[in-house]
Image (cartoon, helix red, strand yellow):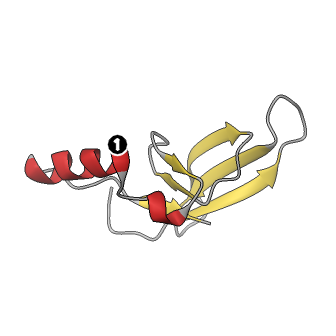
Amino acid sequence: MSQQNYKLLKRVAERKPYKYIYEVVDEGNEVVYVKNSNRELVAMSLDGEFSFTKVDLVNKGEHGLTVKWRETNGLKPIPVAYL
């Protein structure tokens, strides 16, 4: 994934069981990832593996371990998109 700016967009879901639809979009407004959720998210990794309800949780816990593991093994960390 190249050095781009990504945004997280939030929409209210029209149907249950989910309250929200989150889309990660790139600079050209191309959708990179879509996730349905009942939780209020503020950030999400581009692959959707990690989603965050508070900004201060980014790079902490399991996400922090994954970022460190990727850096240790010569891999770039997966970017995170914010609302």
Q: How many marks?
A: 1
> Which quadrant, please, contains the N terminus?
bottom left
Q: Is residue 47 above or below residue 78?
A: above
Q: Residues within 10 Å of mark 1 (few under 14, many from 20)?
A: few
Hey, which residue is sitting farthest right in the picture? 14
Q: What amino acid does circle 1 point to? A: Glu
Left or right: residue 40 versus residue 60 is right
Q: Which residue appears at 46% of the width and 71% of the height?
A: 5
Q: SS class of the residue under badge 1?
A: helix
Q: Is residue 54 above or below residue 50?
A: below
Position in image of residue 58 (x %, y %)? 42, 59
Q: Which residue appears at 64% of the width and 51% of the height?
A: 23
Position in image of residue 77 (x %, y %)? 27, 55
Q: Is residue 77 above or below residue 20?
A: below
Position in image of residue 3 (x %, y %)? 33, 68
The residue lying toward the viewer, choosing from 38 and 83, is 38
The residue lying toward the viewer, choosing from 18 and 63, is 63
Hey, which residue is sitting farthest left in the picture? 73
Q: Which residue appears at 27% of the width and 44% of the height?
A: 66
The residue lying toward the viewer, choosing from 61 and 29, is 61
The residue lying toward the viewer, choosing from 19 and 59, is 59
Quadrant of the image occupied by residue 49: top left
Q: Which residue is mark 1?
A: 62
> Which quadrant, please, contains the C terminus?
bottom right
Quadrant of the image occupied by residue 8: bottom right
Left or right: residue 18 versus residue 50 is right
Left or right: residue 37 versus residue 47 is right
Left or right: residue 79 versus residue 76 is right
